[in-house]
Amino acid sequence: MSKEDNLSMEYFVLKPGSKDPAHARASRTAMLEYADTIEVTHPSLAGSLRVWVQRLSDKDRETSNG
């Protein structure tokens, strides 16, 4: 059994601004899902996460359009 299989609690880091498009997309998707989940109990944080994702997406579009 590996060390990873034996952990009772684990975490990982999201990198929504990653240069790797797949990692960035996965990170942003996770952030939006998390925002949806905490909306009722933490609306301000949920809103901040959505704004962050939107700004990164807008920046990506500007970069790809020249």
Image (cartoon, grey):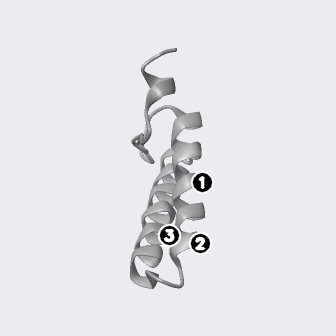
Q: Amino acid at mark 1?
A: Thr
Asked whether the viewer can see residue 66, the reply is no
Q: Amino acid at mark 2?
A: Asp
Residue toward you, 41 or 47: 41
Q: Give the answer, above or below, for where 32 lies relative to 24.
A: below
Q: What residue is drawn where x is 52% and y is 14%? A: 1
Asked which secondary structure carries label 3, the reply is: helix
Asked which secondary structure carries label 2, the reply is: helix
Tell me the residue that label 3 is attached to: 50
Q: What residue is drawn where x is 51% and y is 42%? A: 24
Q: Which mark is residue 29?
A: 1
C-alpha separation, residue under disc 1 versus residue under disc 3? 10 Å
Q: Which mark is residue 1?
A: none
Mark 2 crowdedness (10 Å alpha carbons): few <14, some 14-19, many ≥20:
some
Do labels 2 and 3 touch, CB within 8 Å?
no
Name the N-terminal-most of marks 2 and 3: 2
Residue toward you, 11 or 44: 11
Mark 1 crowdedness (10 Å alpha carbons): few <14, some 14-19, many ≥20:
some
Mark 3 crowdedness (10 Å alpha carbons): few <14, some 14-19, many ≥20:
some
Give the x, y percent position of residue 2: 48, 15
Residue toward you, 59 or 10: 10
Q: Amino acid at mark 3?
A: Arg
Give the x, y percent position of residue 52: 42, 64
Q: Which quadrant holds residue 48?
A: bottom left
Residue toward you, 41 or 45: 41
Q: Which mark is residue 36?
A: 2
Q: Give the answer, above or below, for where 49 lies relative to 19.
A: below
Asked which secondary structure carries label 1, the reply is: helix
C-alpha separation, residue under disc 2 versus residue under disc 3? 9 Å
Give the x, y percent position of residue 5: 51, 25
Asked whether the viewer can see residue 44, the reply is yes
Name the N-terminal-most of marks 1 and 3: 1
